[in-house]
Image (cartoon, rainbow, N blue to C red):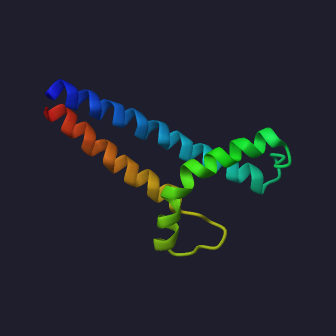
């Protein structure tokens, strides 16, 4: 039973680590769009932006409602990274205790 649980925790950890990079990509892309580096009229770029938005927005939206408004600065990705970091560390401790 511990082998199955250990493998399941490992898969969840991999997924959370990948999601961390998706959030990082979202932050970088939002900066590039804001500074006009990326042409959003290109259909391939628009598709990539839409995929990143659909992956990150469900997790970032509730955090944006809770966090105070700092104008143009969005702190919700940092808060989500901290939450993910906490979850990853807890899962790693559970995995090593099995």
Compared with 77, 4 (above or below) is above
Q: Please determine whether, in this image, residue 44 is positioned above or below residue 1.
A: below
Q: Position of residue 70 (x, y in %)?
A: 59, 73
Q: Position of residue 51 (x, y in %)?
A: 64, 45
Q: Position of residue 33 (x, y in %)?
A: 76, 52
Residue lying farthest top?
3
Please state the horizontal and vertical placement of residue 42, each as a whole percent of the image.
84, 43
Dividing the picture into quarters, in which one does residue 8 lie?
top left
| Residue at 26% in and 41% down | 91
Residue lying at 15% horizontally and 28% vertically, measured from the top left: 2
Instruction: Say which quadrant the C terminus sits in.
Output: top left
Q: Nearer the viewer, residue 6 or 28?
A: 6
> Residue at the location (68% across, 48% down)?
50
Q: Is residue 78 left or right of residue 35?
A: left
Q: Is residue 76 above or below residue 13?
A: below
In the rendered image, the vertical position of residue 36 relative to residue 18, given as above or below: below
Q: Residue at x 25, y 45 (%)?
A: 90
Relative side of 89 to 42, left or right: left
The quarter of the rendered structure image containing the N terminus is top left
- In the foreground, 7 or 25: 7
Q: How many marks?
A: 0
């Amino acid at each position: 039973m511990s082998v199955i649980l250990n493998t399941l925790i490992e898969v969840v950890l991999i997924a959370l680590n990948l999601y961390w990079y998706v959030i990082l990509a979202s932050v970088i892309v939002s900066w590039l769009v804001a500074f006009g580096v990326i042409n959003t009229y290109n259909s391939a770029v628009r598709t990539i932006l839409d995929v990143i938005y659909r992956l990150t927005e469900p997790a970032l939206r509730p955090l944006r409602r809770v966090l105070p408004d700092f104008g143009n600065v969005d702190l919700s990705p940092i808060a989500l990274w901290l939450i993910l970091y906490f979850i990853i560390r807890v899962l790693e401790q559970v995995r090593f205790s099995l």
